[in-house]
Image: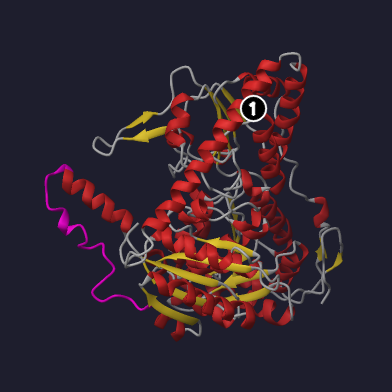
Amino acid sequence: MTAFTRGSTGMSPAAYGSDFIVDLMRAFDVEYAACNPGATFKWLHDSIVNYAGDGPPHMIECTHEEISVALAHGYAKATGKPMAAIVHNIVGLQHATMAIYNAWCDIAPIMVLGGTGPMDLTTRRPNIDWLHTALVQGNQIRDYVKWDDQPHNLESVGESFIRGYRVATTEPQGPVYICYDADLQAQRIEVPMAMPDVGRYSTGTPPAIDPEALRLASGWLAEAQRPVIIADFVGQNEKATSALVDLAELLALPVLDRVGRYNFPSNHPLDLTGAEGELLAEADLVLALNVKDLFGALSARDAVSHGSFSRLTDSTKIIQVSLWEQRVRGWTTDIQRIPQVDLNIPADMSVALPQLVAACREVIEGNSASPSAAGEREQRRARLTERHDQLRSEWRQRAQETSEQTPVSVSKLASDLWDCIKGEDWVLVGGNLAGWARRIWDINKPQHFQGGSGGAGLGYVAGAALGGALAFKGTGKLCVSLQPDGDFMFSPGALWTAAHHRIPYLTIMHNNRTYFNSEEHAVDVARNRERDVEKRGEGIWISGPEIDYAAMARSMGVYGEGPVDRPEDVIPAVQRAMRVVQEQQLPALVDVVCQPR
């Protein structure tokens, strides 16, 4: 078949409607399509495996729609481009809804494709086609996708796909949903379809900072005595992360990383993540960069009253640079509370940060006659470096102090894993060991970290880690997933997909045998009500019986070790599993029984 690419035109050789959809996927370099099979897209399925031949797109078989979408979510974060997740009419879409909402909250670009109908009721099978058809199907997820469509005929399919791809990849990014009627997919093409020149439908250029806002922001930053940067989703673009390092170094600015993406090197002397309370309490200026929940980032929470109070003084100036408000919906309150800001700048990080660096450099060069300002910056740099080193030392000391605990302490596990992987070309594709990976590991490249929790609900990490590992397959990188046990039980079938498609990555099961977040809530409520905290595990602990995750992995064709609960056994088990991943290019899992935190 013709391999259409961006900028190419001509007549599609497609014989059926679903073939033409595949041509569009190829034109936009959609390399993979993840799905659990369904009757309403059986024609699209046939076109992927027969019309596309050896691909792309390549079919990735999943055991659940939530895994399909989470896989596409992780792939998008690793590559910066969408892949497709195909879901079966309203029942498959309902299974996928949690994963779609996660992608929405995590601004991940995904092309969710679906089948429905037939919309022509005279061609529906009795019972089943009626139960699986809705008017219109997109209503089910419209409040947490950027756009949805159900093209009426073949002539509309091209424009629909182009718009969907462009909307998904325009900042702020997010999932889109396109639904194809069964009859449209099955339709025989009698007159050849013209392929659009997709190169002429490119995503818009990112918005820059308004000149007056740039003048104010750079002036405030250069003059501040105790400035602080808070970064969250800066790392969607590598150009933005390098500019953030330049800005921090230019003005000796401490950076607090909210880990929505890779934003700032964890071992950089100006990384002060972990010292939020002390820095914000004395800050005279806060620069918030693509922070999803700025109100929360600037606040502390009272565990007793459940109220919030500001960490800042009344005189602290706040500059916000973000595009989050461009994706607000009325149905979901993931928009967060509105913070007070003194300068609100809607701009894209990849453009805004280089602008800020250049403008701030002009300001300080213009003030070169004043050596006191430069001296103050150097004093601040020295003070911040000392505090950074102190934090890292305290975390390493914590790992050492808990090194003999059984089950294994989370800090010790993070330290042992770092000893195993630090000499490798590694990628963390999922999880973070309750924050300990960033505290102990040197995370200093965009590839090292794909982002934090991934949205709002459990069941994300297993599929997303698989998607990240798929993105790096064949590169020689060691992909590692730090898999929480409770999250894993929502989507364990991801391991079967890993084995079936021979996707090499190392899963470390963070097995604390509890939904620990809920356990903390149970303790807080019981204490506040003067009740028995010893019952905190009822309905929360994952025990009685304990789950054998290594046996579960082996049952699905994945190398499994464990449960490992003695600290001296962790490194040998991880090293054996690493050899499977690196030498045999297969997935492996090590189940490590851990302390609750």
The residue sitting at 62% across, 54% down in the picture is 109
Image x and y of residue 526, in percent: 17, 48
The residue sitting at 50% across, 68% down in the picture is 67
Which residue lies under the disc numbered 1?
378
Q: Assign the magenta stretch its main secondary structure.
A: loop
Q: Element under label 1? A: helix
Image x and y of residue 478, in percent: 62, 69
Between 317 and 383, the one lying in front of the other is 383
> Which residue is outermost to the top?
369
Image x and y of residue 569, in percent: 42, 75
Q: Is residue 224 above or below residue 4?
A: above
Quick check: is 540 in the magenta stretch? Answer: yes
Quick check: is 407 in the magenta stretch? Answer: no
Between 326 and 195, the one lying in front of the other is 326
Which portion, as a residue range, is magenta?
Answer: 528-549
Place residue 48 in its image quadrant: bottom right
Image x and y of residue 483, in percent: 45, 65
The answer, for residue 328, to whether it is visible in the render is no
Q: Crowding near pointer 1: few (<14 within 10 Å), some, many (20+)?
A: some
Q: How is the image coloured?
A: secondary structure
Q: Is residue 404 above or below residue 202?
A: below
Asked whether, in this view, residue 460 is left or right of residue 442, the answer is left
Asked whether, in this view, residue 28 is left or right of residue 115, the answer is right
Asked whether, in this view, residue 205 is left or right of residue 454, the answer is right
The answer, for residue 148, to whether it is visible in the render is yes
**Quadrant, the N terminus:** bottom right
Between 141 and 548, the one lying in front of the other is 548
Q: Is residue 553 above or below residue 249?
A: below
